[in-house]
Image (tube, rainbow, N blue to C red):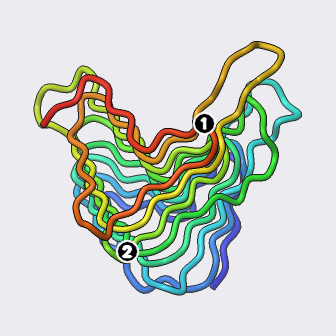
Amino acid sequence: GNLKISANGIGYYLEPSSMRGLSGTIKIDDGQAIGIFGGNGSNIDIQAPMIFEVGDINSSILNPLGSFGIVGKDGTNILNSGEIKVGNGSVGIYETDSVVKNFGRLVSSGSSINENSVRVMIYGNKGGNIINESTGFIDAGDFGVGIYENGKNYLLTIPSVENRGVIKAGDSYYDPVSGNEFHSIGIYGEASSIKNMTASSQITVGTGGIGIYSYNPSG
């Protein structure tokens, strides 16, 4: 069935546990709400035609906070074959020391452009591994990031990103007031290993965009 989650809420909490076979739509409001949280080696398997709708931040308030479709921590395995729509300032899938395999779709649903509009389809932290499989389709839209992997100051393992499918990011955004430019990026990796795996793998970006940005790369 369908589920709606308000600010600071969590739709499903797993620690540790396994989840498979959900159906319907999970709608997630702004304000650090989470659709599914998995910790301590949980297994989250999202099958089509499951849909997540992660809402835009509320830009009318001070210090607005984005939300998350799926969060996995501490050895959690996330498999996505469904569709995750990501609004401005929010994250589709967030992992820390976990594994994400995307067989489905993560797409931008945000419309406005301002300094709070950055949306990330998949965000990895510490020693995680992210694979966009051959059927995986990621479209971060304008002023968005397809995959962001942050291994900074983490020495136990080297985080990795592998793209075997399609990743798109739209145009970058120039703020005429501050003079800052915010780039749309296909894959961003810091202290991480990044591989665009096959001849059929695609990364395309719009005006001012960056296909792959690797800072202090490893491997």
In the drawing, what numbered circle is on residue 208?
Answer: 1
Q: Residue at x 63, y 29 (%)?
A: 182
Q: Position of residue 154 (x, y in %)?
A: 20, 26
Q: Nearer the viewer, mark 2 or mark 1?
A: 1
Q: Position of residue 168 (x, y in %)?
A: 52, 57
| Label 2, residues with CA under 10 Å away: few <14, some 14-19, many ≥20 | many
Front residue (pair 36, 13):
36
Residue pointed to by mark 2: 103
Amino acid found under the numbered disc labelled 2: Phe
Q: Is residue 145 visible?
A: yes
Amino acid found under the numbered disc labelled 1: Gly
Please, which residue is most extreme toward the top here? 178
Splitting the image into 4 quarters, where does residue 187 fall?
Answer: top left
Q: Secondary structure at mark 2?
A: loop
Q: Position of residue 47 (x, y in %)?
A: 43, 82
Please, which residue is most extreme toward the right here? 60
129 relative position to 165: left or right: left
Q: Secondary structure at mark 1?
A: loop
Q: CA distance from mark 2 to mark 1?
A: 28 Å
In the drawing, what numbered circle is on residue 5?
Answer: none
Seen in the picture, residue 119 relative to 208 is either above or below; the reply is below
Q: Residue at x 32, y 32 (%)?
A: 214
Q: Earlier in the sequence, mark 2 or mark 1?
A: 2
144 relative position to 45: left or right: right
Q: Position of residue 66 (x, y in %)?
A: 65, 42
